[in-house]
Image (cartoon, grey):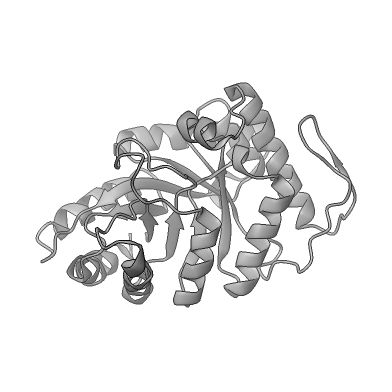
Amino acid sequence: MKLGLHLANFTYDIGPPGFAAKLDEVVSGADAVGFDRISVMDHYFQIPGIGPAEHEMFEAYGILGYIAARTSRVKLGVLATGVTYRNPGFLAKQITGLDVLSQGRAWLGIGAAWYEREHLGLGWAFPPLRERYERLEEAIRICLQMWSDDDGPFTGTHYQLAETLCSPRPIQQPRPPIMVAGSGERKTLRLVARYADQCNVRGDSPEGAKRLFAILEQHCEAEGTDYQAIERTVTMRFDPGPEGERAAEVVDKIGELADAGAHAVLGSLQDAGDPRVMEAMGRLVIPQVAEL
């Protein structure tokens, strides 16, 4: 079982002048203790359930560029890029640049977007869900074409590109991995089966994750793709405690998700700014789940 650190909360109560040093401490710590990957959200306002909208939030690929420079091993990606926020050709260039500058550590996580408030607040169009899914599929196809030998045009319903030239090319071959994120049973998981190397679904319960994986397998059968080749990931919260007093509970929950069919768990870390918590993950959780 592989573990990823998901950075969803950037409020460390230290103010902007101290933020870079604190982030450096968190991500270099995650790199050192054995996390497999680091992800950030694609939001501009903080989201409900984590904090008030006014809390600190950073543009995803900008902060990943900084994280790439402060780490050497962890894979880097967004969980998940909202298709409405960027032209897909520009997105492919962002992923490519991150891959090249991180020496082959980038992955594309993408979804249909959902947070209407920040769309309206910052002036992005927020089309109906059906259109967002149409755009999502076209965006994936554009990225695949830009990472191929086809530099020709792309003509879709929502996006038209006269050239799909991408230079430099990504370091990873044949391309950076693609994750389609979300638990939508009819559309999202079908897009996973059709295009993706990875999925990410809710990890609220092992039973729920197992059910969604079974639906994904059905979509793979219908699409003629290999279900076993798709890395299945879930999200949860890691809370081992500063002394590791709850580490066994974290390990047990991860074990249940592994039994449900997950290959990797991407988790937000409670009190990630406390070095003792990061150390507890590296000492008491990551080694224990490595063989699951």
Q: In which quadrant is the C terminus drawn?
A: bottom left
Q: In the rendered view, does 10 fall on the left or right side of 160?
A: left
**Quarter in which the N terminus is drawn:** bottom left
Of 84 and 214, the residue lying toward us = 84
Asked where in the image residue 247 lies, by quadrant, the reply is bottom left
Residue name at image x 45 percent, y 76 percent: 70
Where does residue 289 sit, x and y in percent of width and height? 29, 62
- Total labels: the figure holds 0
Res. 26 visible in picture: no
Residue shown at the point (41%, 51%) measured from the top left: 57
Residue 46, given in percent of the width and then of the height, sits at 38, 43
Q: Residue at x 31, y 46 (%)?
A: 236
Inspect this view and state whether residue 43 appears.
yes
Where is residue 143? Give x, y as percent: 72, 50
Residue 231 location, x and y as percent? 51, 52
Front residue (pair 50, 234) = 50
Left or right relative to 45: residue 272: left
Horizontal arrangement in the rendering, residue 71 relative to residue 272 (left or right): right
